[in-house]
């Protein structure tokens, strides 16, 4: 059971969320299909590349929803 996914404040969310994706054994390709975007967008987001607007809260929510974790409580700490 997931419980809380603690995202560390001041660090890019992408690498932290990548760990959640990997824990669920979901590929970047599968996640990109769920999000309706290109695999390269997921890759850039996970690397912490915010130059494409991928660091927005909207993107974080899309990512979490695509992982099926939208109902889980996520605390930024």
Image (cartoon, rainbow, N blue to C red):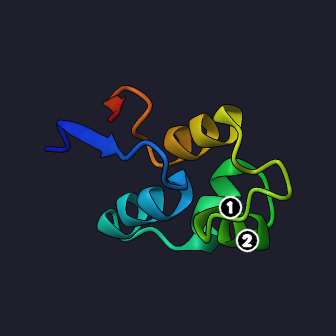
Residue at 61% over, 71% down: 47
Residue 19, x across and y down, in percent: 37, 65
- Is 22 rendered above or below residue 31? below
Residue 22, x across and y down, in percent: 38, 70
Viewed as shown, does residue 66 lie left or right of 35? left
Which one is earlier in the sequence, the residue at label 2 or at label 1? 1
Q: Residue 46 lies in what quarter of the image?
A: bottom right
Residues tagged 2 and 1 counted as in contact (Cβ below 8 A) = yes
- Residue 70's tag is none
Is disc 1 placed on a helix, strand or loop?
helix
Query: Crowding near pointer 1: few (<14 within 10 Å), some, many (20+)?
Result: some
Viewed as shown, does residue 37 lie left or right of 31? right
Viewed as shown, does residue 38 lie left or right of 56? right
Residue 67, x across and y down, in percent: 46, 49
Q: Residue 16 lies in what quarter of the image?
A: bottom left
Q: Residue 32 lies in what quarter of the image?
A: bottom right
Residue 23, x across and y down, in percent: 30, 66
Viewed as shown, does residue 24 lie left or right of 63? left
Residue at 86% over, 56% down: 52
- Is 47 rendered above or below residue 36? below
Label 2 to label 1, Cα distance in Å? 5 Å
Is disc 2 placed on a helix, strand or loop?
helix
Residue that extends furthest to the right in the rendered view of this protein? 52
Give the labeled residue for mark 1.
Answer: 32
The N terminus is located in which quarter? top left
Residue at 29% over, 42% down: 6
Give the labeled residue for mark 2.
Answer: 39
Residue that extends furthest to the left in the rendered view of this protein? 1
């Amino acid at each position: 059971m997931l419980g809380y996914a603690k995202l560390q404040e001041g660090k890019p969310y992408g690498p932290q969320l990548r760990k959640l994706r990997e824990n669920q054994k979901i590929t970047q390709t599968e996640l990109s299909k769920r999000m309706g975007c290109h695999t390269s967008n997921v890759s850039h987001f996970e690397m912490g590349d915010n130059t494409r607007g991928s660091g927005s809260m909207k993107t974080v929510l899309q990512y979490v929803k695509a992982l099926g974790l939208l109902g889980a409580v996520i605390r930024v700490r």
